[in-house]
Image (cartoon, rainbow, N blue to C red):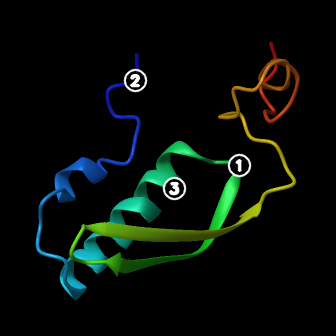
Amino acid sequence: MEPQFGSGLQQFFFRQMDETLKGEIIDTIKTALLHNEPRITVLSVTVDFTDVLNGLTEVTIKYKYNQTNTRHNYVFPFYLKEGTNLKQ
């Protein structure tokens, strides 16, 4: 239903695990969260290659939950009642 929804992390499968890859993963995650999750503010994203031999990558995301609602929040019934100043 939403072809642009998601992080796109599959593009990094089977790549060499180095500092450049860490930076690309961090940037991709921050961008995906910015566009797809308006209810949070990302404080930090860290990437660690915990097991290079087996390709294990650990991602830690620290975020703050926004107390105010937005018109992009599709949680029922809030998107009908809150988060907008538009008159119907």
- Residue highlighted by disc 2: 2
Residue 23 placement, left or right of 69:
left
Identity, as a three-letter code, of the amino acid under mark 1:
Arg
**Near-viewer residue (57 or 81):** 57
User: Callout 3: few (<14), some (14-19), or many (20+) C-alpha neighbours within 10 Å?
Assistant: some
Q: Secondary structure at mark 3?
A: helix
Residue 29, image x and y in percent?
42, 61
Amino acid type at mark 2: Glu
Q: Which residue is depicted at the point 84% across and 26% down?
A: 78
Q: Which residue is mark 1?
A: 39
* Residue closest to the eye, 60 or 73: 60
Extreme residue in the bottom direction: 19
Q: Position of residue 85 (x, y in %)?
A: 81, 33
Q: CA distance from mark 1 to mark 3?
A: 9 Å
Dot 1 or dot 3: first in sequence order is 3
* Residue sitting at x 25%, y 67%: 55
Q: Is residue 81 above or below residue 27?
A: above
State left or right for residue 69 relative to residue 26: right
| Mark 3 or 2, nearer chain start | 2
What residue is rendered at 78% in x and 33% in y? 84
Residue plotted at (69% across, 26% down): 74
Which element is circle 1 on?
loop
Task: Determine the CA span between mark 3 and mark 2.
Answer: 16 Å
User: Helix, strand, or loop for circle 2?
Assistant: loop
Residue 88 lies, with reference to residue 63, above or below; the image says above
Q: Are marks 1 and 3 in contact (CB under 8 Å)?
A: no
Q: Is residue 62 left or right of residue 48?
A: right
